[in-house]
Amino acid sequence: MYEDTERCVRAVQSKDDRFDGWFFTAVLTTGIYCRPSCPVVPPKVENMRFYPSAAAAQAAGFRACKRCRPDASPGSPLWNERADVVARAMRLIGDGVVDREGVQGLAARLGYSVRQVERQVQAELGAGPLALARAQRAETARLLIETTRMPMSDIAHAAGFSSIRTFNETVRAVFALTPSELRSRVRGGKRSKSPGVLSLRLPFRRPLCPDNLFGHLIATAVPGVEEWRDGAYRRTLRLPHGHGVVSLRPEPDHVACRLSLTDLRDLAAAISRCRWLLDLDADPVAVDEQLAADPTLAPLVAAAPGRRVPRTTDSAEFAVRAVLGQQVSTAAARTHAARLVLAHGTPIEDREGGLTHLFPSSEALADLDPETLAMPKTRRATLLGLVSALTSGDVDLTAGGDWVHARAQLAALPGFGPWTVESIAMRALGDPDAFVATDLGVKIAAETLGLPTSPAALIAHASRWQPWRAYAVQHLWATGDHPINRIPAVEESA
């Protein structure tokens, strides 16, 4: 979009926050870059330059605006809508792969050479993987500087910088302030006094309908791993350097996020996974416009605009839970998962609630005794087959995985039908066009709305909803009276 100058100018002049994250506006006369919705008086058109990423604006010599904080914009929806190499690369960069494994590790995960990855990312984003990772490190550093009392040397290490000097130079270049000056701008009361605990706001594009988003996560919560407490959804996180606990509370203009991490190097990955879980980088206006074009869905969209797809913080975890939920009720699936967690999960300490375990990794389930599973033999075999494929790498469900290839890998496993494959594609892989045509709730909704009920006929009708069929599923599910469609009252918290 950044190449469409007229459209960008209109967005800046109208301060349209729907375009935050789509592009960044640099101002020649001030040397700063802003998000489109920056509250300051818009600059003259001849002084505007547009960039596809904050990293590209930084590379061109511009510094982040202190008013609108462009580095804290929602991410571009393109990286969650597409499955090409650049989109997959951006999802991996967001998860911290470049910081942990370098550009070579990124390229290896994508199956391309370093040169090919750098060329494609540079062409589309105006900056290479290293520059994009640097911009992300700067944002992580800013969060730690402003919200904690950590020494600057510890912040530099936690944010992923190789040295204090690089940390100081990057912060000064991006924010036009030294780390100490950046901290002095924030009132002391906003900083966390608890080591490893941070409170932050997760922005999103409006509108957002929290009912099905949080309702689904709460209704399917696995005891010990997830809970609804004091008006917030809480869960444990398995992260690259340790583990964490997150509390997420929907607010009118943001999601309040409280993170407790055992290793602050995991901050960027934790934020990325929480945003992915809640689908916060979606473009709800584009989705609703497409779905509302169908007269059958139009009233549903008008009644609850901005529905998101509830996802997961761990794709392998969700795949296991999808198998446990085959042909059983939500309550039964939770019971099966809870037993697995108690027997094979990693115990953790939660000082603020009732969370007790991390969901077991595929490696922890590799030696699972099938006789301990209270389920039919065929489903036991399906679960063991999935665990084996995840452990060996025969199935790739990671952030940078290819959606088409992953579907083929899953479909080749015993016991994996269309419902299981599409459920994983929708909630673990994040494919916005995944469609569970054989789902019972979808079938009941289709019958209620006068839509075709056979899978083939419903898929044919749903072609008009592409590429947003996963969002159409959320509207179809919402026609039923089920706990997944509503947030419990605060008094119902654990």
Image: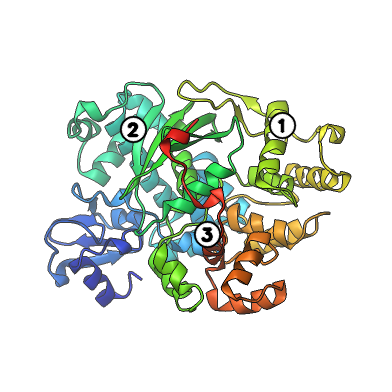
**Quarter the N terminus occupies:** bottom left
Query: Is residue 435 depicted above or below 166 in this figure?
Result: below
Q: Which residue bears the numbered disc 1?
A: 339
Q: Which residue bears the numbered disc 3?
A: 478
> Residue type at mark 1?
Arg
CA separation in Å, label 1 and label 3: 29 Å
Answer yes or no: is residue 111 visible.
no
Q: Which residue bears the numbered disc 2?
A: 144
Q: In x, y percent, where is residue 95?
A: 50, 45
Q: Residue, x 44% and y 42% (percent of image)? A: 271
Q: Secondary structure at mark 3?
A: loop
> Residue type at mark 3?
Ala
| Relative to 298, 3 lies left or right | left
Earlier-in-chain disc, 1 versus 3: 1
| Relative to 380, 470 lies left or right | left
Task: Check disc 2: other Cα within 10 Å, few if <14, some if 14-19, many if 20+.
Answer: many
Q: Residue, x 72% and y 51% (percent of image)? A: 395
Cβ–Cβ below 8 Å for labels 1 and 3? Answer: no
Tell which of 482 and 240 is nearer to you: 482
Task: Check disc 3: other Cα within 10 Å, few if <14, some if 14-19, many if 20+.
Answer: many
Q: In x, y percent, where is residue 237?
A: 54, 35
